[in-house]
Image (cartoon, grey):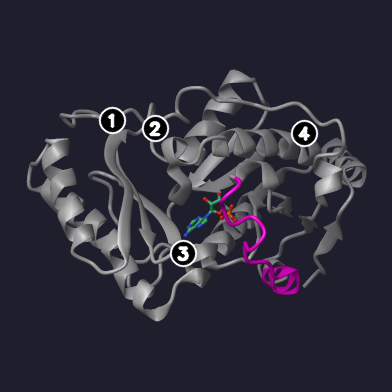
Amino acid sequence: MKKTRVIESIKEMQAHCESLRLSGKKISFVPTMGYFHEGHLSLMKEARKTADHVVVSIYVNPTQFGPKEDFSKYPRDFERDTQMAQSVGVDVIFFPANTEMYPNAYQTYVDVEQVTQNLCGMSRPGHFRGVTTVCCKLFNIVKPHSAIFGKKDFQQLAAIKRMVADLNLDLEIIGLPTFREPDGLAMSSRNFYLSQEDRSSALTLIGVLRLAQKLYADGERNAAVMIKQAEKLINGAQFTAIDYITICDATTLEDVNEIKGEAVMALAVKVGKTRLIDNSVLGEELKA
Ligand code: AMP
């Protein structure tokens, strides 16, 4: 298999992608913060299937972490990531330094105003501004025809789609299903932080989503009723603290009371010291 090339410079990345575009090649892009798991690889495999050239970025973006969050201890393993990317046929890893992405005098940010308000926007102020800013920059650097994101980060995907539509960015945004462990836990680089006890408590997140799907299938449409049961389940587990459990409109991400259109149950729960998120669109198959 062809060796995956690593590019660190923005100018080099732009020149590389420009020449691919000029020769008519389709570029698909998977932005990541690294420390790969099967969820990341599922996005790369899809990119490999649908495009001529696959670019993956590995960049732990400082502007999306709050001052008390885990930026400095976020897990990193570039060698392992490179091997995993190579194993699924990634052509290029873009691996920029902070000084390359945010040089002195940097002062421009992209702010998507509404879909970033609720859910994680409440407990992580500034997070989505960092995400949309770095993605906008990465899109200008990689110039992809399509970019692939996971629905695991549902609000992130909604914010990126809004930004691309609002700023007329010329690429397609594709969202793929959450890849789960055999027991249903959503794969996440942050699962690495979980102790053995945390790991079993973390299963209450998928438990809640399964319960919500069951209630929905049985005809329940009152969000408060479903949320109350979900809270009971999480509060019954050890080492858990609810950040939020909500049912919201799948496009605007505003809370709903009576479920009518497409709605998603989304939750963020601290398990031990680790904040985990998960979600499921009600009425959609929950693969786990
Ligand atoms: P991250 O490295 O956590 O920033 O994630 C990079 C991309 O992988 C984002 O689009 C995430 O939504 C996606 N992703 C993370 N975990 C999963 C998962 N379990 N299944 C599918 N996609 C995922």
User: Judging from the image, what secondary structure is the residue with disc 2 in?
Assistant: loop
- Of badges 2 and 3, nearer the viewer stands 2
Kindly indicate whether the residue at mark 2 contacts the one at mark 1 (C-beta within 8 angstroms): yes
User: In the drawing, what numbered circle is on residue 140?
Assistant: 4
In the image, the segment drawn in magenta is 67-84
Q: From the viewer's perspective, is residue 154 above or below residue 241? A: above
Q: From the viewer's perspective, is residue 220 above or below residue 202? A: above
| Badge 1 amino acid | Asp
Marks 2 and 3, how far apart in space?
23 Å
User: Which is nearer the N-term, disc 3 or disc 1?
Assistant: 3
Kindly indicate whether the residue at mark 1 contacts the one at mark 3 (C-beta within 8 angstroms): no
Marks 4 and 2, how far apart in space?
28 Å
| Badge 2 amino acid | Asn
Residue 195 sits in which quadrant?
Answer: bottom left
Respond yes or no on whether mark 2 lies under 8 Å from ligand 1.
no
- Residue identified by numbered label 3: 187
Residue 47 in the image: state x and y as whole percent.
62, 52
- Residue identified by numbered label 1: 255
| Badge 3 amino acid | Met
Kindly indicate whether the residue at mark 2 contacts the one at mark 4 (C-beta within 8 angstroms): no
User: In the drawing, what numbered circle is on residue 234?
Assistant: none
Q: Is residue 247 visible?
A: yes
Does the magenta stretch mainly form a helix, a strand or a loop?
A: loop
